[in-house]
């Protein structure tokens, strides 16, 4: 996924009242070095990010992404992003995504250069990988212990478990472990036996006529794609719910999906080696909705 565009942002105060922030963006060569060796995003992973799916140059679920960026900044004691500045930066970047088809825009905000006066902020744009095949054939997943109980985030907020930080080494290690076990992806579970989330995705289960996702109270990152899908399902009259889900309920689900901004809705066809029925028709309808322009 080669970058096609990148710009650096001079962060504005969250209460900056200007309406045009174009002068705060600096376009850079997406293929050239851009960060200082003293940058804390690379030294310590000390920063936050968002990945925004783009369809036909339209940024998807942008309001939810900007909300989550602000939430992550608050948890990490970073300056609150100026929403309008970042919105304009996203639309600038979107013009460099494919005119037809899917792209991805990444928003990054770090604490900046060590001992420096200001944070570092930048945005990139690229063509998204072709996820058509995996959306159709599905994935096999394994459950992996995340190493803490479901009440740990409330007792230890300094672990930043509800923030989307640049410290993704654990998430990537989990994906490698899943592949070592013959699977495509993983579902994190708490040490006391409750379902959490996947390393880069949210989980949705179908139980009868209900659609359920783990409640975001165990350090779970609230999924923007899942939020959009649940709003859509509710508008169609379906029941949706956020619940604390014991691991045992995975085996009894009628269907299950992992959802993310770029891969969208991917059906799960096996969990820990046990086969699970994939609802192909429902999956297709999910992705048809998720590929339609949405605010």
Image (tube, rainbow, N blue to C red):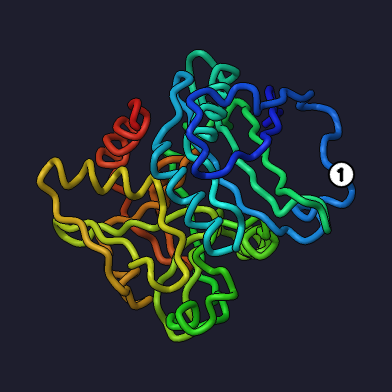
Residue at 32% x, 49% y is 227
Left or right: 207 with respect to 227? left
Q: In this view, does 81 lie above or below 97?
A: below
Q: Name the residue nearer the viewer: 280 or 242.
A: 242
On the rendered image, what quadrant is the C terminus found in?
top left
In the displayed structure, 35 sits above or below 249; it is above
Callout count? 1
Q: Is residue 202 left or right of residue 34?
A: left
Please tell me in which quadrant of the rendered image residue 248 appears: bottom left
> Residue 56 location, x and y as percent?
45, 19
Residue 78 versus residue 30: which sits nearer the camera?
Answer: 78
State the image coordinates of residue 115 (x, y, percent, origin top left): 83, 58
Which residue in the rendered view is the most extreme toward the top?
Answer: 99
Q: Which of 191 and 99 is in front in this view?
A: 99
Based on the displayed image, in which of its 4 quarters is residue 161 positioned?
Answer: bottom right
Q: In this view, does 63 lie above or below 101?
A: below
Mark 1: give few (<14), some (14-19) or many (20+) Cα within 10 Å.
few
**Could you say whether the residue bearing mark 1 is in a helix, strand or loop?**
loop
Res. 276 image quadrant: bottom left
Residue at the image position 68 percent from the left and 24 percent from the top: 5
Residue at 45% across, 44% down: 65
- Residue at the far right: name it: 37
Residue at figure coordinates x 82%, y 35% from the top left: 34
x and y percent of residue 174 in the render?
62, 64
Disc 1 target residue:
36
Quarter of the image that includes the N terminus: top right
Give the percent coordinates (x, y) of residue 136: 41, 37
């Amino acid at each position: 996924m080669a970058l096609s565009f990148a710009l650096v942002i001079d962060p504005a105060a969250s209460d900056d009242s200007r309406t045009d922030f174009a002068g705060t963006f600096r376009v850079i060569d997406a293929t050239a070095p851009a960060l200082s060796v003293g940058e804390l995003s690379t030294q310590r992973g000390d920063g936050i990010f968002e990945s925004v799916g783009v369809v036909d140059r339209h940024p998807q679920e942008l309001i939810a992404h900007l909300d989550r960026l602000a939430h992550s900044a608050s948890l990490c004691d970073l300056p609150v992003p100026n929403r309008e500045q970042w919105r304009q930066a996203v639309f600038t970047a979107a013009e460099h995504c494919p005119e037809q088809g899917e792209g991805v825009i990444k928003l990054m905000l770090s604490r900046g250069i060590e001992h420096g006066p200001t944070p570092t902020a930048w945005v990139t744009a690229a063509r998204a990988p072709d996820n058509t095949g995996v959306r159709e054939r599905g994935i096999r997943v394994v459950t992996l212990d995340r190493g803490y109980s479901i009440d740990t985030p409330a007792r230890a907020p300094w672990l930043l478990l509800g923030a989307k930080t640049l410290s993704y080494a654990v998430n990537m290690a989990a994906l490698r472990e899943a592949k070592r076990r013959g699977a495509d992806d993983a579902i994190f579970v708490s040490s006391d036996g409750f379902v959490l989330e996947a390393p880069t995705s949210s989980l949705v289960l179908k139980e009868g006529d209900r659609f359920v996702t783990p409640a975001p109270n165990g350090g779970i990152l609230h999924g923007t794609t899942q939020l959009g899908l649940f709003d859509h399902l509710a508008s169609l009259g379906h029941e949706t719910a956020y619940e604390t889900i014991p691991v045992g309920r995975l085996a009894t689900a009628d269907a299950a999906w992992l959802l993310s901004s770029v891969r969208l809705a991917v059906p799960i066809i096996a969990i820990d080696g046990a086969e699970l029925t994939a609802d192909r028709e429902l999956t297709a309808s999910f992705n048809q909705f998720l590929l339609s322009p949405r605010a």
